[in-house]
Image (cartoon, grey):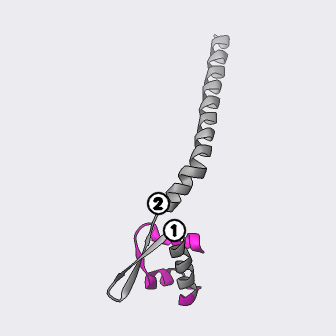
Amino acid sequence: MRRAICDALRPRPLTTKQVCGAFEDLDRTTVMMHLRVLERAGLVVPVRKGRERFNHLDAMPIQAIHDRWIGPHAAHAARGLARLKTELEAADDKQKLAAD
């Protein structure tokens, strides 16, 4: 549910009422609980404008996780795929030469 809330906030900040409207199967209290957890985790930053509370997604913690944990693994996988591509192209070139 919290990932779904983050996904809803990705394009633009939403008021708490708008977030609740996006999750009609949940009551307002439950949505507020999830927003508080996301706020404590540093993923949602609330900004009050008059009587409304706009919830902004802070992507920096997500980026930090990506850089620390996902990025190195993705780079390793990309190197492996590049090496496989090179080997397959070399094998294809050998087949073409043998066929001529």
53 relative position to 27: left or right: left
Q: Amino acid at mark 1?
A: Asp
> At x 57% / y 69%, what residue is drawn?
3
**Nearer to us: label 1 or label 2:** 2
Which residue is at a point 42% across and 67% down the rendered structure image? 11
Q: Are marks 1 and 2 in contact (CB under 8 Å)?
A: no
| Extent of the magenta region | 1-29
Rounded to the nearest whole Å, what is the CA distance between mark 1 and mark 2? 15 Å
The relative height of residue 53 versus residue 2 in the rendered view (above or below) is below
Q: Is residue 42 above or below residue 34?
A: above
Instruction: Please state if 93 lies on the left or on the right of 62 as rendered.
Output: right
> Which residue: 56% across, 77% down?
37
Where residue 42 sits: x, y (%)? 50, 69
Q: Find disc 1 in the rendering and name its residue.
A: 7
Image height of 79 relative to 6, above or below: above
SS class of the residue under badge 1? helix
Residue 24: give x, y in percent of width and height: 54, 85
Question: In the rendered picture of this protein, how many numbered marks are placed on residues?
Answer: 2
Q: Residue at x 60, y 26 (%)?
A: 86
How far from the left and from the top, in percent, is residue 60? 47, 60
Query: Where on the picture, by quarter, is residue 38?
Result: bottom right
91, 2: nearer the viewer: 2
User: Which quadrant holds the N terminus?
Assistant: bottom right
Residue 4 x, y percent position in the rendering: 56, 71
Mark 2 closeness class: few <14, some 14–19, many ≥20 residues within 10 Å: few
Locate residue 10 relative to residue 30 in the image: left or right: left
Quick check: 19 left or right of 80? left
> Which amino acid type is marked by label 2?
Met
Residue identifier under label 2: 60
